[in-house]
Image (spheres, rainbow, N blue to C red):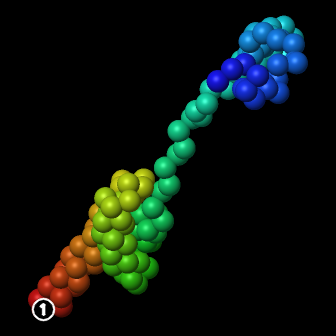
Amino acid sequence: MSESDRPQDPWASVPNQGAYPGPVGPQQGYGYQPPMPYYYAPLARRTNGLSIAALVCGICGFIYLVPAILGIIFGIVSLNQIKRDGTEGKGMAIAGIVTGAIWLALVVVIIVLIAASNNS
């Protein structure tokens, strides 16, 4: 294949400008901000909603004992979800279970004391 048989380079007539100029050097002075890295701060993990509900129900367990029972149930379910999903709120779930159990135990003790005092 000779030189005349080769296709012509369409960019042959463009003067050579040199290599790609690349990024502009650091610009310092008034208002200079260093460039942001390609990564940012890690995102905060979500808090499990049932763990919040467990804590609130556990604290309010003195109201007819229904919230205390719900606090224990929500706490157990949220611990399972936290283990599966990796969300935050394990401490709140445990606190909801503990406070709900304390309210239930307190009511049982009061009922036993009342029953014992009536038999005397």
Q: Is residue 89 above or below residue 115?
A: above
Give above or below for 79 relative to 44. Answer: below
Q: Quadrant of residue 51?
A: bottom left
Could you tell me the amino acid type at mark 1? Asn
The relative height of residue 61 versus residue 3 in the rendered view (above or below) is below
Q: Residue 67, percent across and down?
A: 41, 78
Residue designated by label 1: 119
Q: Determine if residue 45 is in view.
A: yes
Horizontal and vertical percent position of residue 20:
75, 16
Disc 1 is placed on an element classified as helix
Quadrant in the picture for the C terminus: bottom left
Q: Residue furthest bottom?
A: 119
The quadrant holding residue 4 is top right
120 or 11: nearer the viewer: 11
In terms of depth relative to the viewer, which is nearer, 44 or 68? 44
Pointer 1: residues within 10 angstroms few (<14), some, or many (20+)?
A: few
Relative to 44, is 6 on the left or the right? Answer: right
Residue at image location 31% in from the left, 59% down from the top: 83
Q: Is residue 60 left or right of residue 36?
A: left
- Residue 112 is situated, as x and y percent measured from the top left of the image, at 18, 82
Visible residue check, residue 117: no
Location of the N terminus (image quadrant): top right
Q: Would residue 40 be found to the left or right of residue 87 on screen?
A: right
Counting the numbered discs, the total is 1
